[in-house]
Amino acid sequence: MIKYLGLLMLLLSGLGLGFWLGQSQLPPNPVALSPAERKPLYYRHPMNPQVTSPTPAKDEMGMDYVAIYAEQPPAAASSPKSDKILYYRHPMGAADTSPAPKEDEMGMDYLPVYEGEQAHAGQVRISPEKIQKLGVTTAVAEQRALVRNIRALGSLQVDERRVHAVTPRFEGWIQRLHVNATGQAVKRGQVLLDIYSPELLTAQQEYLIAREGQQALQEAGEQARDTARRLAENALQRLSYWNIAPAQLQRLQALEKPFDTLPLLSPVDGVVLEKPAIEGMRFMPGELLFRIADLSTVWLLAEVFEQDIGGVRPGQSVAVHINAYPERLFSGKISFIYPTLATETRTVKVRVELPKDEGLLKPGLYGSATLTTEQEKDARLAIPDSAVIDSGTRQVVLVQKGEGLFEPHTVKLGRQADGYYEVLEGLEAGDKVVTRALFLIDAESKLKSALEGFSSNETTPEAQQGDH
């Protein structure tokens, strides 16, 4: 009995030892290891697998970055379109690739890029979630007629061609002043003042004497009569040269009596701008007594910036707003473009003629002119001006090449009009350009890398691999 019990115990011990040896040969179960026992390789953005961090971090919405372990394939490499590895890229998103597996300066493995998965060099890939969150919008480059509105500020001025100076051509005194206030309206032929002049009185008497001699020589010889006639005509012509009104000369001929004073008449309908004349004062030949302006038309002298002057031409219609009458809109035409530019303001003066409207347009009032440039006969390829990234040395737009895939294009732009730029080079009709690109803030490193590769004509991954 004891012999059988010993054999049984020996058998059971052998079975236990074999089970223990069998278990010791099995590989460890990775699931049995807790997350605390595993060391993450790196951490990736929860919404954008292309963004990684060597330490735990949070995204802009407060979400924790996802830990990536050695036995867990990176999300960026999940579901590749094929199993062919094109090259290996830097794990932190830098513009660095390698044709073979390697580690970066922090000991992190480069990530494999599969065929059909990665954008070409010079392109930027943004996840659909990021695009939707930031509200990225695009517009199509298309043919468009460009119409441009130019606005220029200015002030109303007197029409220089309608200003008249009243100046006598002889010496005398102002006997009586009929128009004695600046700003007073006058009519053509209205008496401005009465003049006493010894020279004028002597000239009248000479004419009357010559006329009497002409009548006395009616029965004389032909030569004598002709001489008397010419003396009378010359005396009358002298009065005419002194700007004596024809009505006054006719009155002198009819009454045959000189006048002690003669009236000086207004040459035009207008408003008195200046009145140096004072009753009783003495004046000399050529001295200014009145300055009268015809205000039937006025000028708006507007200042147009030099970059806009190319769209301005004489005869162009202009809509004018006067600050004093915000509810009114006046219309005029450009009559002259001044030939010089003011270096202080970089503007060119433009003259707009305006008909006086019920006396509302007063010289000195401020206003603005809105000019609409001519519409181009042929439509031009154009994009919204918000799509242009201007670095100062070149202009770049982001073209959408596919879902979440964007490529920077250098463009040559023409004139800007109505919120659009004319595209001369760099785009074709139908290209989609990004008009709202706030996502560039988060993708700054990718964009810089793409632009550098684009400017140096690095268009393929193979070209980058050749650098290593």
Image (cartoon, grey):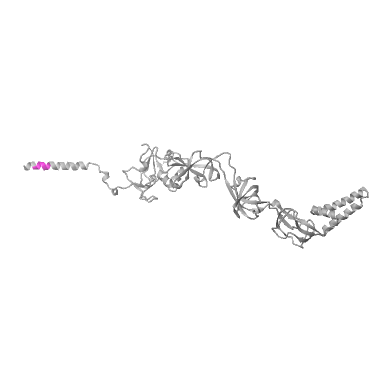
Name the residue rendered at 76%, 59% in the picture: 193
Pick the front one: 243 or 439: 243
Q: Is residue 205 left or right of residue 449?
A: right
- Residue 195 picture location, percent across and down: 79, 59
Q: Is residue 143 magenta?
A: no
**Quarter holding the C terminus?**
top left
- Residue 346 picture location, percent across and down: 60, 51
Pick the front one: 43 or 206: 206
- Residue 456 picture location, percent across and down: 48, 42
- Residue 116 picture location, percent across and down: 40, 37
Count how many numbered circles sit on residues in the image. Answer: 0
Q: Is residue 9 magenta?
A: yes
Query: Taking the image as drawn, is residue 94 in sight?
Result: no
Above/below status of 414 relative to 274: above
Q: Is residue 79 left or right of residue 27?
A: right
Q: Residue furthest left?
A: 1
Pick the front one: 294 or 109: 294
Q: Quadrant of residue 96?
A: top left
**Quarter holding the N terminus?**
top left
Q: Residue furthest right?
A: 220
Query: Taking the image as drawn, is residue 366 in sight?
Result: yes
Q: Is residue 88 left or right of residue 369?
A: left
Q: Is residue 198 left or right of residue 385?
A: right
Main SS of the magenta segment?
helix
Magenta stretch, residue numbers: 5-10
